[in-house]
Image: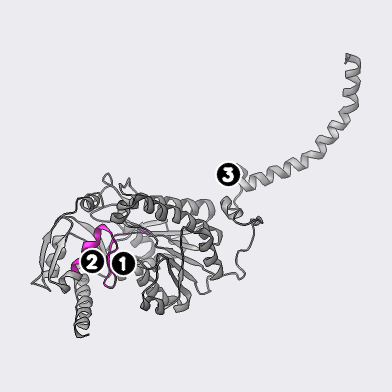
C-alpha cells in the first residue's frame, strides 16, 4: 500500500474510530464500577460485602447479590431458631437443655451423625446432620429457618492425635462448610475454642487473649484456624462470629470425650463407683478448669451480648485452676476411702505441658460482664452429690 492511499484510509476511518470510542466509554465505565463492587477494592470506596464464590455456584442458577435467602425476615424481637452441631458430645446435650429454657423446646434443634439415646430424642427436636455434607447442612438451615448456629462438631485433643486425617476433615473442612452456610444465611455463629489453641511457646501463667499460640496438636491447630477464619469472615463478609476459649470443662451428666482434661471428670465416676482412681497426668500438672453450668451460661451471655460491647471475636474465659493432686485432696474430704494412683500417659502429659496453667479472662469480664459461680469446693460438692444420688438410684433399681 503506497503512502498516499494509506493516508486517505486513515482520514476515512478516523471519524468512525472517534465515534466508536465515544460510544464505548460509558460501557467501560459501567464495567469498571461493576468490577469495583464485585472485588470490594478499598481504593474504590465500596462497602458492600462480597459473598464467597461457592455461595453463587451451589445451584445451576446464579443467586443475586441482594437476594433474600429467607422467606420471612427476622428482627431482634423474633424468637431465635437454634441449631447445635455435634450435639451428642460432652456439651451439646447440656447446651440444648439450657437454651430450650430460654427459647422454648421446639426452637432448639440438636443434631449429630449418631443415633441419640432415647431420653435425648424425647427431650426435644433432633435431626441427622453431617457437617461434611454442605448441601445437607444448608437444607437444614433453610428448612428450619435457623438464626443461631452453635458448632460443636470436633475431634478432641487425644482422639485427634490418634486419627489426624479424620480430625483434619471434621475440624477444618467441616468448619469451612459451617462458616459458608452461616455467612450466606446471615446467622449468628458460635464456635468454641480451647486451651489447646496455645502451645509451648505461649505464656502459660497467665495466658492472655492475644499472644503467640503455635499449638502442636491437630486439635489445637484446627482451633487456631477456626478463630482466625471466623475473624476473617467477620471483617470480610460481616459474619457475626463469636468464640470462647474454654478451659477444661467438667460435667456431671456426660462421659469423658477423649480430651486431656478428662481425668477431672473421671475421678468422680471412679470415686463413687469403686473408690479407686488412676490418673494419667502427673499430680502437679496445673490446668484451668470450669464447671459446665458456668460454661453454658458464658456461652449464652456472649451470644446475647450487644455487638458494640465486644472488642474482639474470641475471648478467654476461666473459673479456677488446679492440679490432679489438689482435686484429689478436695475429693478426699468427702470420700476419705478414695485411693488415687498415677500412671502417666506420655502423649496426654506432653499435651498438658504445652497448655496454659491459668487463663487471663479480664477482657471477657470487662466487655460483657463475665463472672463465674463455681470454685473448686463448690465443683466437688456438686459433682459428688450428682454421682452419689445416681449411684443410690442404680443400687435401688
* Residue wearing tag 3: 42
* Residue wearing tag 1: 371
Image quadrant of residue 171?
bottom left
How many other residues sit within 10 Å of disc 3, few (<14), some (14-19) or many (≥20)?
few
Q: Are marks 2 and 3 in contact (CB under 8 Å)?
A: no
Whether residue 354 is visible to the viewer of this picture, yes or no, is: yes
Q: Residue furthest bottom?
A: 396
Closer mark to the observer between disc 2 and disc 1: 2
Dot 2: element: helix
* Residue wearing tag 2: 265
Magenta segment, which residues?
Answer: 244-268
357 within the magenta span: no
Of the image marks 2 and 3, the number of the one nearer the N terminus: 3
Of the image marks 2 and 1, the number of the one nearer the N terminus: 2
How many other residues sit within 10 Å of disc 1, few (<14), some (14-19) or many (≥20)?
some
**How many angstroms separate mark 3 from mark 1 (CA)?**
40 Å
Of the image marks 3 and 1, the number of the one nearer the N terminus: 3
Q: Residue furthest front?
A: 115
**How many angstroms separate mark 2 from mark 1 (CA)?**
22 Å
Q: Are marks 2 and 1 in contact (CB under 8 Å)?
A: no
Q: Are marks 3 and 1 in contact (CB under 8 Å)?
A: no
Residue found 84% across the figure and 31% down from its top? 17
Amino acid at each position: 500500500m503506497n503512502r498516499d492511499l494509506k493516508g486517505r484510509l486513515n482520514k476515512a476511518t478516523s471519524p468512525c474510530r472517534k465515534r466508536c470510542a465515544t460510544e464505548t466509554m460509558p460501557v467501560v465505565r459501567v464495567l469498571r464500577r461493576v468490577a469495583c463492587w464485585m472485588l470490594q477494592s478499598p481504593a474504590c470506596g465500596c462497602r458492600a460485602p462480597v459473598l464467597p464464590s461457592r455461595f453463587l455456584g451451589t445451584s445451576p442458577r446464579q443467586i443475586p447479590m441482594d437476594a433474600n435467602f429467607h422467606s420471612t425476615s427476622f428482627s431482634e424481637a423474633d424468637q431465635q431458631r437454634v441449631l447445635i452441631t455435634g450435639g451428642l458430645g460432652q456439651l451439646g446435650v447440656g447446651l440444648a437443655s439450657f437454651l430450650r429454657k430460654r427459647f422454648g423446646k421446639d426452637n432448639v434443634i440438636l443434631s449429630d451423625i449418631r443415633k441419640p439415646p432415647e431420653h435425648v430424642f424425647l427431650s426435644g427436636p433432633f435431626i441427622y446432620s453431617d457437617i461434611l455434607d454442605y448441601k445437607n447442612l444448608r437444607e437444614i438451615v433453610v428448612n428450619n429457618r435457623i438464626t443461631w448456629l452453635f458448632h460443636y462438631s470436633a475431634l478432641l485433643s487425644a482422639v485427634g492425635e490418634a486419627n489426624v486425617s479424620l480430625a483434619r476433615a471434621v475440624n477444618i473442612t467441616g468448619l469451612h462448610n459451617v462458616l459458608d452456610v452461616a455467612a450466606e444465611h446471615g446467622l449468628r455463629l458460635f464456635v468454641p475454642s480451647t486451651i489447646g489453641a496455645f502451645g509451648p511457646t505461649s505464656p502459660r501463667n497467665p495466658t492472655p487473649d492475644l499472644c503467640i499460640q503455635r499449638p502442636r496438636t491437630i486439635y489445637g491447630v484446627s482451633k487456631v484456624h477456626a478463630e482466625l477464619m471466623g475473624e476473617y469472615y467477620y471483617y470480610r463478609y460481616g459474619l457475626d462470629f463469636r468464640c470462647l476459649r474454654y478451659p477444661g470443662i467438667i460435667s456431671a451428666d456426660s462421659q469423658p470425650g477423649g480430651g486431656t482434661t478428662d481425668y477431672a471428670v473421671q475421678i468422680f465416676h471412679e470415686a463413687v463407683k469403686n473408690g479407686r482412681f488412676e490418673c494419667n497426668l502427673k499430680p502437679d500438672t496445673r490446668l484451668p478448669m470450669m464447671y459446665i453450668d458456668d460454661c453454658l451460661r458464658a456461652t449464652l451471655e456472649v451470644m446475647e451480648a450487644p455487638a458494640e460491647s465486644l472488642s474482639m471475636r474470641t475471648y478467654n474465659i476461666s473459673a479456677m485452676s488446679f492440679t490432679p493432686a489438689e482435686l484429689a485432696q478436695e475429693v478426699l474430704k468427702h470420700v476419705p476411702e478414695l485411693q488415687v494412683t498415677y500412671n502417666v500417659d506420655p502423649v496426654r502429659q506432653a499435651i498438658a505441658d504445652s497448655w496454659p496453667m491459668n487463663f487471663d479472662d479480664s477482657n471477657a469480664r470487662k466487655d460483657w460482664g463475665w463472672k463465674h459461680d463455681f470454685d473448686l469446693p463448690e465443683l466437688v460438692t456438686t459433682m459428688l452429690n450428682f454421682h452419689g444420688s445416681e449411684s443410690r438410684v442404680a443400687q435401688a433399681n
